[in-house]
């Protein structure tokens, strides 16, 4: 089956671009990309599709040639990895909307969408790392359901301070499932009730004391009034106070 990309040959008289080993120049990247592409072609022709896909991915990373997405899709398709093939084909269509291969690729995308299953992973903790089959897929909440190949898959959700969730899901073609990933906090909060002790009120603050004192004071006033009711001469200015009558 024909692959859909070729990398341009480098001019013979073009001198190599000097660059330090830790920072390859664009020219060096293109040379490496061409080498990975040729290796991928060999693997593809021999039916070693996983190896071909790996080489095409590396060539794409180094060259950013969008045509290589088509090659990646065909390689994953050849090994039956529908989910990765679907992802590569969609990226190809988005990068090259006017490609002559578009009708064929769109038809294949429609077929693959019926062959994968969709799984929504709902973690109880925001920011939990989600790992599916050993591959990190993002942090919760994930923006969309995962498209997975039919079969069994392992799911791990983890976050520091919480007990990790580990589960499995079996995916059927065209199915839609939800996995509730419950993470339990490792921090235990214990509430201890302290018995209430009533604070003793000092004797001088007790209401009944002041009631008695009030009575005594009032009584004292009345007594003074009674004593003053006696008509006795009052020293001082010639002012006669009125008599106090006690009933």
Image (cartoon, rainbow, N blue to C red):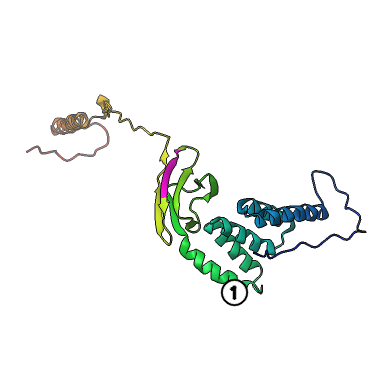
* Res 205 quadrant in image: top left
Q: Please report the residue visible at 52 percent of the width from the left and 49 percent of the height from the top.
A: 139
Q: Please report the residue visible at 55 percent of the width from the left and 47 percent of the height from the top.
A: 136
Where does residue 181 sit, x and y in percent of width and height? 41, 47
**Could you say which is closer to the camera, residue 47 or residue 19?**
47
Where does residue 108 sit, x and y in percent of width and height? 55, 68
Q: Which class describes the residues within 10 Å of circle 1: few (<14), some (14-19), or many (20+)? A: few
Q: Is residue 227 left or right of residue 191?
A: left
Image: 103 above or below 119: below
The secondary structure that dominates the magenta segment is: strand
Image: 196 above or below 17: above
**Could you say which is closer to the camera, residue 70 or residue 221?**
70
Q: Is residue 159 left or right of residue 4?
A: left
Image: 200 above or below 79: above
Question: What kind of element bears circle 1?
Answer: helix
Image quarter where the N terminus lies is bottom right
How many numbered marks, from 0 up? 1
* Res 219 quadrant in image: top left
* Residue farthest toward the left in the current orientation of the protein: 247
Image quarter where the C terminus lies is top left
**Could you say which is closer to the camera, residue 31 or residue 39?**
39
Identify the magenta region: 163-169
**Could you say which is closer to the camera, residue 119 or residue 6?**
6
- The answer to whether residue 166 is magenta is yes
Image: 65 above or below 129: below
Q: Please report the residue visible at 72 percent of the width from the left and 56 percent of the height from the top.
A: 37
- The answer to whether residue 130 is magenta is no
Disc 1: which residue: 103
Q: Please report the residue visible at 61 percent of the width from the left and 54 percent of the height from the top.
A: 49
Q: Is residue 8 left or right of residue 235?
A: right
Where does residue 54 sit, x and y in percent of width and height? 65, 51
Where does residue 115 sit, x and y in percent of width and height? 47, 62
């Amino acid at each position: 089956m024909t692959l859909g990309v070729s990398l341009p040959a480098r001019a013979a008289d073009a001198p190599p671009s000097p660059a330090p080993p830790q920072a390859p120049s664009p020219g060096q990247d293109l040379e490496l990309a061409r080498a990975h592409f040729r290796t991928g072609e060999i693997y593809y022709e021999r039916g070693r599709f996983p190896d071909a896909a790996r080489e095409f991915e590396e060539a794409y990373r180094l060259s950013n040639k969008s045509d290589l997405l088509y090659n990646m899709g065909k390689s994953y398709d050849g090994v039956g990895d529908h989910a990765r093939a679907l992802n590569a084909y969609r990226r190809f269509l988005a990068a090259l909307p006017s490609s002559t291969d578009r009708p064929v690729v769109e038809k294949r995308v429609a077929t693959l969408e019926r062959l994968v299953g969709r799984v929504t992973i709902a973690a109880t903790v925001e920011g939990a790392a989600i790992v599916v089959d050993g591959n990190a897929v993002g942090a919760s909440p994930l923006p969309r359901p995962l498209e997975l190949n039919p079969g069994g898959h392992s799911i791990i959700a983890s976050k520091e301070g919480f007990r990790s969730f580990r589960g499995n899901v079996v995916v059927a073609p065209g199915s839609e499932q939800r996995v509730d990933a419950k993470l339990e906090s490792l921090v235990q909060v214990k509430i201890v009730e302290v018995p209430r002790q009533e604070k003793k009120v000092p004797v001088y603050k007790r209401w009944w004391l002041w009631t008695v004192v009030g009575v005594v004071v009032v009584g004292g006033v009345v007594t003074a009034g009674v004593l003053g009711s006696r008509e006795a001469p009052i020293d001082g200015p010639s002012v006669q106070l009125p008599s106090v009558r006690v009933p």
